[in-house]
Amino acid sequence: MISGAVLGGVAFAAFTRMRAWEEWIGLGVGLWVLIAPWLLGFAGVSSALWTHLLIGLLVAILAALELWRMHGTPPARPA
């Protein structure tokens, strides 16, 4: 629940103004949610495992794509 609350807070902050730190936090929390079943010892609970895997992977991929979009693509040069 704490990870979900952090993601919700970061998502709310992103509505006001887009900043790179929000995406870095989203990437970190997404990766944490992805590996949490093994670190916290509930990998044997199938529904919790798959929920964490899917949500964590989705959040991490979306945050990484946004970071790549923000930093990986150079700005266009005016003609």
Image (tube, rainbow, N blue to C red):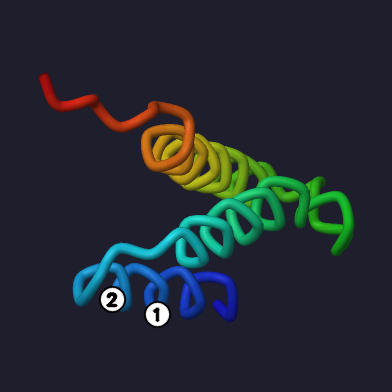
- In the displayed structure image, the side of residue 11 where residue 16 appears, left or right: left
Task: Report the front residue among 30 and 15.
Answer: 15
Q: Which mark is residue 37?
A: none
Quadrant in which residue 40 is drawn: bottom right
View extreme (left): residue: 79
Identity of the residue drawn at 38% across and 28% down: 74
View extreme (top): residue: 79
Q: Which mark is residue 9?
A: 1
**69 lies above or below 27:** above
x, y (%) of residue 21?
A: 52, 66
- In the displayed structure image, the side of residue 26 where residue 74 appears, left or right: left
Amino acid at dot 2: Phe
Task: Report the front residue among 52 and 68.
Answer: 68
Quadrant placement of the C terminus = top left
Secondary structure at badge 1 equals helix
Quadrant in which residue 28 is drawn: bottom right
Identity of the residue drawn at 56% across and 38% down: 57
- In the displayed structure image, the side of residue 21 where residue 35 appears, left or right: right
x, y (%) of residue 44?
A: 81, 46
Quadrant placement of the N terminus = bottom right
x, y (%) of residue 78?
A: 14, 26
Amino acid at dot 1: Gly
Contact check, label 1 and label 2, Cβ < 8 Å: yes
Secondary structure at badge 2 equals helix
How many residues crowd mark 1 within 10 Å: few (<14), some (14–19), many (20+)? few
Mark 1–mark 2 distance (CA, rounded to whole Å) = 5 Å
| Residue pointed to by mark 2 | 12
Identity of the residue drawn at 41% across and 73% down: 10
Identity of the residue drawn at 72% across and 50% down: 45
How many residues crowd mark 2 within 10 Å: few (<14), some (14–19), many (20+)? few
